[in-house]
Image (cartoon, rainbow, N blue to C red):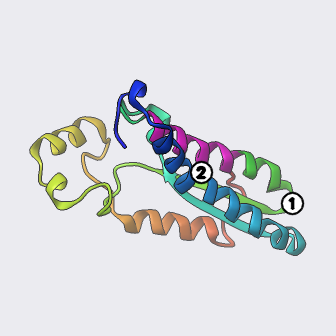
């Protein structure tokens, strides 16, 4: 669904929001009553850092991911005083087959881009995101929200 803004199709826009933004709201809305009753809970959404900087020809994707980030931030503020912590892990440049198949990871132009744009000069491991999620879900993390 990569396209210049003037070529974004309504169906593509809706598909991105239907697959990224709407399910997150449905999930959070469904689990919140039980967390409120229990007076505790953790909500962790793995999102994207793409909307923080933007990506040319990907404005619809950035908008849908930005909706996720904004939603979780607002939910976090809304529920924190009720001992429910909502956080987004807005990752970028993390190895996964969807965004970085082998042909991309082997592409010299892409590797040069990574070296110019990623402080660690490399693609991150999915296990790093998993470890962060585990910490955010743990009893040791009771201050971070957003």
Vertical relation: 134 (above or below) 123: below
Mark 1 or mark 2: name the one nearer the start of the chain: 2
Closer to viewer: mark 1 or mark 2: 2
Q: Is residue 44 left or right of 58 when viewed as pictured?
A: right
Bounds of the magenta segment: 59-73
Q: Is residue 136 left or right of residue 126?
A: right
Is 65 within the magenta?
Answer: yes
The verdict on residue 74 being magenta is: no
- Residue 139 in percent (x, y) is at 69, 72
Which image quarter holds the N terminus? top left
Q: Main secondary structure of the magenta part?
A: helix
Q: In this view, does 77 lie above or below 143?
A: above
Give how far apart the Cα atoms at labels 1 and 2 are: 24 Å
Task: Identify residue for label 1.
Answer: 82
Q: Residue at x 22, y 59 (%)?
A: 101
What residue do we see at 84% from left, 68% from top? 33
Choose top left, top right, bottom left or bottom right for residue 53: top left
* Other-residue count near label 1 (Cα within 10 Å), few / some / many at <14 / 14–19 / ≥20: some
Image coordinates of residue 75 in percent, x first then y, are 74, 51
Position of residue 118 measured from the top left corner of the image (x, y, whole percent): 31, 42
71 relative to 135 in the view: left or right: right
Q: Name the residue under label 2.
A: 21
Query: Can residue 8 be seen by looking at this rendering?
Result: yes
């Amino acid at each position: 669904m990569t396209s210049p803004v003037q070529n974004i199709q309504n169906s593509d826009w809706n598909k991105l929001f239907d697959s990224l933004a709407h399910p997150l709201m449905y999930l959070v809305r469904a689990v919140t009553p039980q967390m409120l009753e229990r007076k505790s809970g953790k909500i962790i959404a793995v999102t994207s850092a793409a909307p923080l900087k933007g990506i040319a020809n990907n404005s619809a994707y950035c908008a849908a991911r930005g909706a996720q980030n904004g939603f979780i931030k607002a939910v976090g503020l809304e529920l924190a005083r009720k001992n429910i912590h909502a956080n987004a892990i807005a990752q970028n440049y993390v190895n996964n087959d969807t965004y970085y198949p082998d042909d991309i990871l082997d592409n010299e132009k892409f590797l040069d881009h990574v070296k110019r744009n990623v402080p660690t000069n490399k693609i991150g491991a999915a296990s790093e995101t998993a470890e962060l999620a585990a910490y955010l879900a743990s009893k040791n993390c009771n201050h971070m929200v957003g």
